[in-house]
């Protein structure tokens, strides 16, 4: 993969798809403990209306994940006969939820073998294997014909991709004219210290985030037009705070699972990660359309 210019400027080597998949295979249980089990993405921590009360921070995280997924389902608005591609489908929760709420078919891809297995179990438990499927695949080499899908989304997955333009062009290729693509994107605010960028790369297995203007430029260069842009930075900051607290709460379990050496490295990373998210990480939702 050819790194974007900002990767060269930072001097940090972007992660390969294999490295991303391996990280999720290894640290999936850690994400369960620090982000909830409903999904692996930034939650929607503030919204109108009321819901069922949460009695633990983990339950609150799951509610935030589900609320965010519902928000994106409404924004993408797939029809009951549509076939949706979920790029970087994680543990399958959003794909299953989309199928349940819209009747659409969903195909999810991920570079993590354990996520594929867990997602298939989730689809089977929901009796949706006829409409929801998951496969091991790289977003930079989508194994599908041109215009195979009616719509697509990528929730927090493009953050792992070094060659954003190539990934965007792959999604553009498999959509028809008028097809919509919803993606979330981490962005860089200000000039973070190198130590914080290195920590973000290790914790999130991601290249340094792009400035907002650069991300939008790549979307246009890939051939998309912008339908809607929404700033949800407040949610990613809250997510970082919750991850920090849940990491501390589950420290004994993390130590037992990953051992003292790995846990000590994570202990050193958490304050840097928290500061980077709070001071330098942005979070935007793009709703794009193939003209």
Image (cartoon, rainbow, N blue to C red):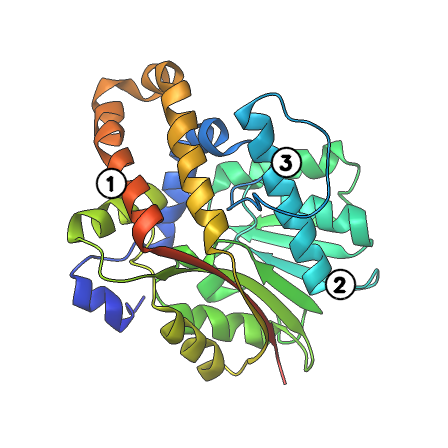
Question: Which type of secondary structure does the marked residue at label 1 adopt?
Answer: helix
Residue drawn at (54%, 27%) of the image: 58
Identify the residue position indicated by label 1 in the image. Answer: 272
Labels 2 and 1 touching (C-beta < 8 A)? no
192 left or right of 123 in image: left
Identify the residue position indicated by label 2 in the image. Answer: 78
Neighbour class for label 2 at 10 Å: few (<14), some, many (≥20)?
Answer: many
Q: Nearer the viewer, mark 2 or mark 1?
A: 1
- Residue 191, given in percent of the width and then of the height, sits at 22, 61
Question: Which type of secondary structure does the marked residue at label 3 adopt?
Answer: helix
CA gap, disc 2 and disc 1: 39 Å
Q: Earlier in the sequence, mark 3 or mark 2?
A: 3
- Residue 65, given in percent of the width and then of the height, sits at 59, 41
Q: Nearer the viewer, mark 3 or mark 2?
A: 3
Residue 274: image quadrant is top left
Question: Which type of secondary structure does the marked residue at label 2 adopt?
Answer: loop
Identify the residue position indicated by label 3 in the image. Answer: 63
Of residues 162 and 18, the one nearer the viewer is 162
Quadrant of the drawing holding the C terminus = bottom right
Residue drawn at (72%, 58%) of the image: 74
Residue drawn at (69%, 80%) of the image: 178
3 left or right of 157 in image: left
Residue 24: image quadrant is top left
């Amino acid at each position: 993969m050819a790194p974007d210019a900002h990767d060269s400027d930072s001097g940090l080597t972007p992660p390969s798809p294999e490295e991303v998949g391996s990280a999720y295979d290894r640290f999936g249980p850690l994400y369960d403990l620090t982000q909830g089990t409903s999904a692996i993405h930034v939650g929607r921590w503030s919204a109108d209306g009321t819901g069922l009360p949460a009695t633990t921070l983990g339950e609150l995280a799951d509610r935030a994940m589900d609320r965010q997924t519902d928000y994106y389902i409404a924004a993408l608005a797939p029809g009951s006969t549509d076939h949706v591609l979920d790029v970087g489908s994680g543990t399958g929760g959003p794909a299953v939820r989309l199928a349940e709420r819209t009747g659409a078919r969903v195909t999810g891809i991920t570079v993590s073998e354990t996520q594929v297995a867990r997602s298939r179990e989730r689809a089977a438990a929901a009796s949706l294997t006829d409409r929801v499927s998951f496969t091991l695949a790289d977003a930079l080499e989508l194994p599908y014909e041109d215009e195979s899908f009616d719509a697509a989304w990528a929730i927090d997955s493009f953050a792992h991709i070094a060659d954003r333009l190539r990934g965007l062009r792959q999604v553009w290729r498999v959509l028809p004219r008028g097809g919509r693509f919803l993606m979330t994107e981490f962005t860089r605010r200000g000039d973070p210290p190198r130590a914080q960028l290195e920590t973000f790369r290790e914790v999130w297995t991601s290249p340094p985030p792009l400035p907002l203007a650069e991300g939008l430029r790549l979307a246009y260069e890939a051939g998309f037009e912008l339908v809607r842009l929404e700033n949800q930075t407040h949610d990613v900051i809250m997510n970082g705070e919750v991850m920090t607290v849940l990491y501390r709460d589950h420290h004994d379990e993390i130590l037992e699972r990953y051992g003292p050496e790995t846990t000590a490295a994570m202990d050193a990373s958490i304050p840097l990660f928290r500061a980077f998210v709070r001071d330098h990480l942005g979070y935007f939702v793009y709703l794009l359309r193939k003209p």
